[in-house]
Image (cartoon, rainbow, N blue to C red):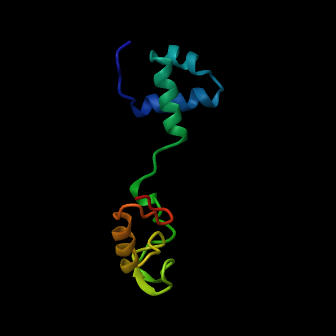
């Protein structure tokens, strides 16, 4: 069997045969297509890919806001919920982590 594009008539025939509870292997024989092609097309018809317009935006857009530093307790402008240590404390931790023999919680020397 050679590859064939699906026409609207083919799709209509596939839908009609599936509505009559005809098995994929029998549909493949009737339509002269591989079973895998029938299964794949039926799967796409049942679960179409969403259009770009139908994709929803994230519930919460991450935006900068004032947060409390988990290290010093001071307030700083955070880039998002994953940014909880201010720049000063980050610099201090980075400097200390490069000193010999220093081990800061979560930072190995």
Look at 47% across and 87% down and name the residue there. Answer: 74
Of residues 101 and 10, the one drawn nearer to the viewer in this rendering: 101
Q: Is residue 91 above or below residue 37?
A: below
Residue 52's x, y, as percent? 39, 56
Look at 46% across and 17% down and name the residue there. Answer: 34
Of residues 94 and 44, the one drawn nearer to the viewer in this rendering: 94
Residue 84's x, y, as percent? 47, 74
Residue 55's x, y, as percent? 45, 58
Number of marks drawn: 0
Residue 69's x, y, as percent? 48, 80
Of residues 8 and 58, the one drawn nearer to the viewer in this rendering: 58
Of residues 105 and 42, the one drawn nearer to the viewer in this rendering: 105
Q: Quick one: which residue is furthest to the bottom in this view?
A: 75
Look at 35% across and 22% down and name the residue there. Answer: 4
Q: Quick one: which residue is furthest to the right in this view?
A: 21
Q: Where does the N terminus fall, quadrant-wise? A: top left
Quadrant in the rendering for residue 57 = bottom left
Q: Is residue 63 above or below residue 47?
A: below
Q: Is residue 22 left or right of residue 58?
A: right
Q: Where does the C terminus fall, quadrant-wise? A: bottom left
Q: Quick one: which residue is furthest to the front in this view?
A: 101
Q: Is residue 12 above or below residue 97?
A: above
């Amino acid at each position: 069997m050679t590859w064939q594009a699906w026409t609207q008539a083919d799709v209509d025939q596939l839908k009609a045969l599936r509505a009559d509870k005809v098995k994929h292997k029998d549909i493949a024989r009737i339509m002269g297509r591989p079973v895998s092609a029938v299964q794949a097309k039926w799967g796409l018809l049942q679960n179409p890919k969403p259009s770009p317009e139908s994709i929803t935006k994230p519930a919460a857009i991450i935006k900068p806001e004032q947060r409390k530093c988990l290290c010093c307790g001071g307030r700083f402008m955070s880039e998002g919920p994953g940014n909880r240590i201010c720049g000063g404390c980050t610099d201090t931790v980075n400097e200390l982590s490069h000193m010999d023999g220093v081990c800061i919680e979560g930072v190995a020397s």
